[in-house]
Image (cartoon, rainbow, N blue to C red):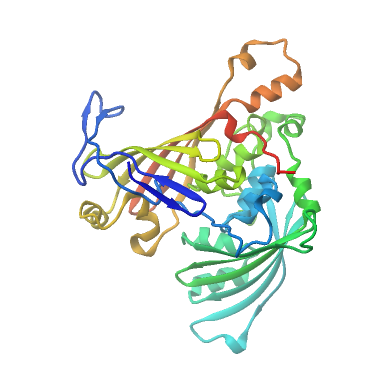
Amino acid sequence: MGREVMEGIVCVSGTHSQNGQPCKTEGSTTTPKIRYTKQSFSRQASYPHSIFCQVTEKISTIPLTKLSPFERLLVTAKGDLQRIISSWCYETVSVEVFYYSLDEDASTETEKRYKRKVGLKCRNRQFCTANSEVVLSNKLLIDSLATNEVGIGQLFRQFNLLPNFELISLERSDSQSDTSDFSRKYSLTAPGIKCIIEEMFDVVEIRRLEQIVIGEVIQQQDLSKNKINTKSNNRLLSVPLDCNSAEFTPFERVLLSAYDNVPRLVSSYLNSPVELVITRSCKLGESSYLRVVELKCVSNNKLFCVATCEFTILDLKLQQQLDNGEFELNDIFRKYRGGSLPMFKLVSASKIKNRIVENDQNQDRDSLLENLKLNALHRSYILSTPFARVHVHELFEPWTTKMVQTEE
């Protein structure tokens, strides 16, 4: 198999059918037994679309080993910071706009430049302050940012824009202290919008949020009615996760709400490169494809996820370009029509229960909690645009979501 190495990520090729040739199947069409030909090839990413954050010494003055897993998730977030915090804490995240002003001297009739400062709050406590310089050349975006108290990242979601992310810097307020506040600067760009954002994180508040554990959720009263609020005024929780929070650890909730950025999240959380192996990739019919991917943690060479991706192409022109080799499956959301952020729908989420947890009624509460954390996580979700639809099934190995400590 061919191998491609990127900074922070190792991507490994797999096997697939000849381009444009359907795989032969046996049995029913719903669960086909697939025969596929072996052919070496190289891929940058094997999910429908993936963006990896590269953190180097030129960018960061903070060794990533000195950040906790939760903090690493935050500093590598690419416009989804609010979703990560919201999912981790099982709470809504609110945005308080301190000021929002038009730079009239630098603006024109067709391009508006703004300066914006907001505070991000969870559980009524501010954990982050963000200063933004925003350049907009799309009237719909201009009106939305001017009239709604929304985060910059939500603009991309609201208008289905797939942003290009670049981390510019990462540093602490006191370079000699591993417990001082930290900040990052990054850019998000898409057609009609360019943002330079600097976020300052309050370490005390971040670590308070990080300490949320599954036991705290289990102790809540009337647990069966405790659902994630997906109808907040600012739509800060866009994930329709209608399930009992006690089943899932904080990081599992982050994974369940991830719209196809699992490799980046796991790589950041474990502080390890991630290896992606395509074990099957073939054309099932005129406009449908199947791709099976194994994801491994390079630092310990352990498998942490198996994902099955079922692609359905809804656009004739895209289908022709795929047949002609102009596009790869994993590029369709990022490159076709200039890039489009797909709509995300969580279909199901469950834990494959440990039999000890199910059958042994004599275990104490602490043992039950520990075993609960070791159950395998499964989810099914759909990514859709007007031109393509992908149904993804993921199964995570239990070790993946156990709490990871920073190095001493």
Where residue 180 appears, as percent x and y from the top left, is 79, 57
Residue 378 lies left or right of residue 23; in this view the side is right
Q: Which residue extends farthest bottom? A: 105
Q: In the image shown, does 359 or 407 lie closer to the viewer?
A: 407
Residue positioned 68% across, 32% down in the render: 225
Mark yes or no: residue 232 visible.
no
**Quadrant hosting residue 80:** bottom right
Mark yes or no: residue 228 visible.
yes
Where residue 206 appears, as percent x and y from the top left, is 75, 51
**Quadrant hosting residue 309:** top left
Circle count: 0
Quadrant of image for the C terminus: top right
Quadrant of image for the N terminus: top left
> From the viewer's perspective, is residue 38 above or below residue 134?
above
Residue 124 lies left or right of residue 36; in this view the side is right
Q: In the image shown, does 6 or 173 lie closer to the viewer?
A: 6
Where residue 123 appears, as percent x and y from the top left, is 76, 49
Where residue 366 appears, as percent x and y from the top left, is 75, 22
> From the viewer's perspective, is residue 211 above or below residue 106?
above
Residue positioned 45% across, 56% down in the render: 341
